[in-house]
Image (cartoon, rainbow, N blue to C red):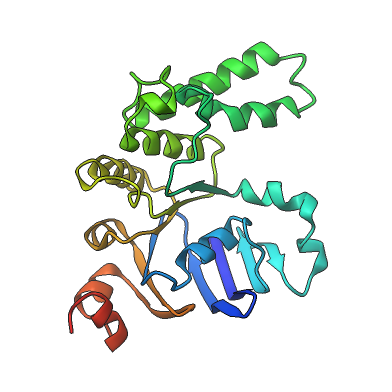
Amino acid sequence: MPILKVENLYKSFKDTEVLCGVGFSLWRGEVLSMIGSSGSGKTTLLRCLNFLETPDRGRILVNDKVLFDDEDPSTQRESDTRKKRLHFGLVFQNFNLFPQYTALGNVTLAKELLAREQPDFRTDKKRILKSIQDEAKALLDQVGLSDKMGNYPHELSGGQQQRVAIARALALNPDILCFDEPTSALDPEISGEVLLAIKDLAKRNLTMIIVTHEMGFAREVSSNVIFLDDGLIAEEGPPEQIFGSPKTERLAAFLGLS
């Protein structure tokens, strides 16, 4: 059973149709890279999966549970949106860290807020907060930032900020970790440290979706690659096929092979 199933997803903004019936499956432990030209629908698809945008039509299932179905109003309640987002961790292009919190504070914040809503928080507050802090420290150590936990975002390089964002996304133990062009806001000389951190996560068999313009990275880290073109999946397959033997002229042209 796939961990994620997307069926016939459509999304328009005014008169512009951005997604035109996208469908795919993702299995636990796989890394799916999405490639394509600017405006092909990659980021919109990612935002629909994270419920930052509401699809017009289609279905989204995680672990065989329907999270969205345009024909079922019970899956479209605004009150359930936050719970649905917990299935996904999203790392943005521009980090989106809270400037008033340290690296450690950025990683612990969401989990602490959720913990405070639980009935046992008041009676077991000290233990719960310590557990959250310990987990956050371990995550920052995992991304190579054990010595920067007390630093604020303005005291960190772009690559370090993005690694904090990765640790923050992991803190809530999402089923699927999503990256939206994670190196696009970074200088080429420091983007490598972020790519290395993502490669390390792939080795740990985390399930990931990566929107990227780094073709060499996608080829190396992916289990499967989707090429989006004008809101449609124009080609899908393992990286050796996508990058080595594209089946369509459009993909060959995008990769500069024709």
| Displayed quadrant of residue 1 | bottom right
| Displayed quadrant of residue 210 | bottom left
x, y (%) of residue 223?
Answer: 34, 62
x, y (%) of residue 226?
Answer: 39, 71
- Residue beneath the point at 53% across and 31% down: 98
Q: Is residue 253 visible?
A: yes
**Looking at the image, residue 175 lies above or below residue 197:** below
Q: Nearer the viewer, residue 180 or 239?
A: 180
Horizontal arrangement in the rendering, residue 169 relative to residue 125 (left or right): left
- Residue beneath the point at 29% across and 56% down: 221
- Residue beneath the point at 27% across and 68% down: 239
x, y (%) of residue 57?
Answer: 67, 75
Which quadrant holds the C terminus? bottom left
x, y (%) of residue 220?
Answer: 24, 58
- Residue beneath the point at 71% across and 14% down: 124
Extreme residue toward the top, this view? 126
Q: Nearer the viewer, residue 99 or 110?
A: 99
| Displayed quadrant of residue 252 | bottom left
Q: Is residue 1 visible?
A: no
**Looking at the image, residue 122 lies above or below residue 234:** above
**Looking at the image, residue 176 lies above or below residue 223:** above
Horizontal arrangement in the rendering, residue 166 relative to residue 110 (left or right): left
Q: Nearer the viewer, residue 258 or 4?
A: 258
Horizontal arrangement in the rendering, residue 255 relative to residue 51 (left or right): left
Horizontal arrangement in the rendering, residue 137 relative to residue 257 (left or right): right
